[in-house]
Image: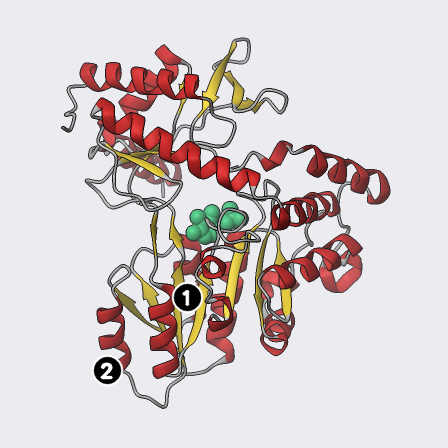
Amino acid sequence: MNYAAAFRERIDALKQEGRYRVFADLERNAENPPYASYHETSEESSSVVVWCSNDYLGMSRNTNAINAFHEAVDRCGVGSGGTRNISGTNHYQVMLEAELADLHQKERALLFTSGYVANDACLSTVSKLLPDLVVFSDELNHASMIEGISHGNAEKKIFRHNDVGHLEKLLKETDPARPKLIAFESVYSMDGDIAPIAQIADLAKRYDALTYLDEVHAVGMYGERGAGIAEREGVMDRIDIIQGTLAKAFGAMGGYVTGDAVLIDCIRSYAPGFIFTTSLAPPLAAAALSSVRHLKSSQMERARHQERSATLKRKLSVAGIPIMKSQTHIVPVLVGDPVACKQVCDQLLRDHSIYVQPINYPTVPRGTERLRLTPTPLHTDWMMDQLVGALCEVWHASGLEKVA
Ligand SMILES: *Cc1c(COP(=O)(O)O)cnc(C)c1O
């Protein structure tokens, strides 16, 4: 068998569809965010404005977080040195878990090396712990949840996005005696819309189902203490398992789940994705701890973030750039074609020193290819005007339609 030819064929298929991914080689500028050096070749680099980072609040270069990271490196070294079970439980992780449990007002929290791993490990493990489980999954759930559910081998029923009527229909059809779990997100990160959390919690109560909520795109950014949308809407106590990341608004790396002590103890004791991997590096845990604590009391970043996002939406609308309806900080700009989407991004980078990554299938459905702009508190009016001007030019050059 010609293995290389078989692999090449698969790559060619992606290229033909216009969704072959090319990584931008960037060097983030901590002293001058949101700028980065873009390394076009090994010799050449230029300064660009990053418009698509999930470091939503700029916390990755927060002074306290950087100091906490440095201090932990000096005290503990770079790595954790083991799995949690075998010498890899570090005091910073223990403090961070306590902080996260408090953030979400749950009995316990458990750290993972990423949000992806947290979803994969928890959803697959809960499925295995509850034989005969039926998982009800929102159709737009993140890949990590889909993988977790599929690895658990439980029966899965997919409900239409944020459609509680459809969810109830599926719940009603299911044997009342079977264990059930509803898995969904608070903020859907590609459209920027929000789940009806209270209504889903009502259904869960009525049909005796567990609830699993991914708050990855909301932690740090919503709620009085930055615990997410469930906090903002006063329904945190009605969700059984809240999952989050330390890698987006908290600016570090790692993921977690929070919930009742017995449930978290089960995941700690049974999830291979938790047990058989080296634990989070102490400096990352220390930096995340600093950010979580900071954002529990500071409203400044959240307020500025929302204001910046609203301002960018307004500027784009005025210019006739088609933004998709978003209830959150995320600003999706519809292109609707994978090749055009990539072309727009290439031109922005090449001619305007603006970096936005095209979002294509399978991250979003075909025909809804888009730019996903994420203004941070550090993006200025001047940068926004430059972006809008550049988009207008590129829109025109690519023959894309504007809206009234
Ligand atoms: C990014 C993301 C994750 C994964 O989190 P990481 O910490 O980046 O692994 C999980 N869920 C959603 C909805 C995400 O967007």
User: Quick one: which residue is furthest to the bottom in this view?
Assistant: 177
Tally the numbered discs: 2
Residue at the spot x=52%, y=27% of the render? 378
Q: Tell us which disc is closer to us: 2 or 1.
A: 2
Residue at position x 40%, y 66% from top?
Answer: 183
User: Residue at horizontal 39%, vertical 21%?
Assistant: 384
Asked which quadrant contains residue 399, the reply is top left
Q: Which mark is residue 149?
A: 1
Q: What residue is at 62 percent from the left and 51 percent from the top?
A: 296
Residue 110 visible: no
State which quarter of the image contains the C terminus: top left
**Mark seen at residue 281:** none
Q: Label 2: few (<14), some or many (≥20) within 10 Å?
A: few
Pick the residue in front: 113 or 161: 161
Q: Nearer the viewer, residue 380 or 401?
A: 380
**56, 46: nearer the viewer:** 56
**What x and y, as percent, mark residue 53?**
47, 33
Seen from this angle, which residue lies furthest right?
Answer: 75
Q: CA distance from mark 2 to mark 1?
A: 20 Å
Look at label 2 and name its amino acid. Glu
Instruction: Using the rendered view, name the quadrant where residue 397 is placed.
Output: top left
161 relative position to 68: left or right: left
Compared to residue 375, the image places residue 362 above or below, namely below
Residue 387 visible somewhere in the drawing: yes
Quarter of the rendering containing residue 315: top left
> Residue tagged by mark 2?
173
Query: Percent from the top left, x then y, of residue 336?
Result: 20, 35
Left or right: 369 with respect to 214? left
* As drawn, 373 above or below 147: above
For disc 1, the neighbor class at 10 Å (few under 14, some 14 to 19, many from 20) is many
